[in-house]
Amino acid sequence: MWSSFKRWFHQWGSPKWFYERSLVWSRWLGLIALLCIPTSIIWGLFFAPADYQQGNSFRIIYLHVPAAVLAQSCYVLMAIAGLVGLVWKMKVADVVLKSAAPIGASFCFLALFTGAVWGKPTWGTWWVWDARLTSMLILLFLYFGVIALESAIQDTITAAKAAAILCLVSVVNIPIIKYSVDVWNTLHQPATFKLTEKPAMPMEMWLPLLIMTIGIYAFFGYVLFLRSRNEIIERERRTLWVRELVERESVA
């Protein structure tokens, strides 16, 4: 068992192996996203019943909640990739960290934007310095910091180490975001879903949200694999296997 895990773990660290396998994975993830996201949008916008308090304005959760959850998950993934890159010196981990940062930043901005759109009719204002909102804004700045480090430092290895350290130090912001509505007195509502509790909304309202969450995660994986493949080709362009790959594609 342990030897199989070690072999699998080191396979993930091989740029060539990752590049070849990720094509198949990205296709499946793209298909899942293509099925789930439109289904959820149509179901959530046109068929789910209106909320008894918020009316139709609640429908923004079908985009806001998955975007916010993904933005936090992405940063945790970056911290894990940073740890793997620092400890085991795996090139693919550095590639994943760099490739994930712009995607996570985009979803974090989307979560903040849709939250502001929802907050205007619900709270009467676009923005309040609420604990959840403020910690999410800090997360967006952290994403910008990682992207800036990767862009500003010319040496790839040094840039990867700096970004990894930043992610590992600042990942403490993720539990702050998660528990901010429980620890502090905030306007933001508690979590929509909890694994230990029955959903507070009827199935015809939470099921499309679940489908959208699956679709958003699949879309994230699809884009992450595509960006990672491009980054691997850029970093490994002088290696034999990349030159052979380019020759085969040029002949085809």
Image (spheres, rainbow, N blue to C red):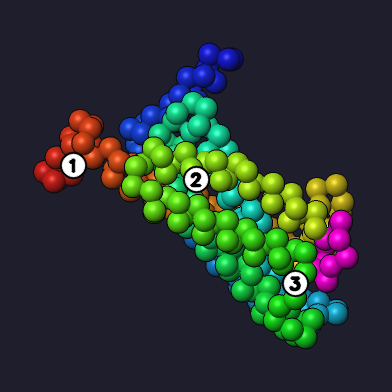
Residue position for label 2: 163
Kindly identify the residue that appears in the image at 38 percent across and 48 percent down.
Answer: 153
Report which quarter residue 43 is drawn in.
bottom right
Disc 2 residue type (three-letter): Ala
Residue position for label 3: 129
Say which of marks 2 and 1 sits in front: 2
Q: Which mark is residue 50?
A: none
- Residue 66 shows up from this direction: no
Of the numbered discs 2 and 3, the one sitting upstream in the chain is: 3
* Extreme-left residue of the structure: 251
Residue stretch in magenta = 181-190
Quadrant (top left, top right, bottom left, bottom right) of the N terminus: top right
Residue 234 position within the rendered picture, expressed as x and y whole percent measured from the top left: 28, 45
- Verify CB contact (< 8 Å) between mark 1 and mark 3: no
Q: Residues within 10 Å of mark 2 (few under 14, many from 20)?
A: many
Residue 206 position within the rendered picture, expressed as x and y whole percent measured from the top left: 75, 63
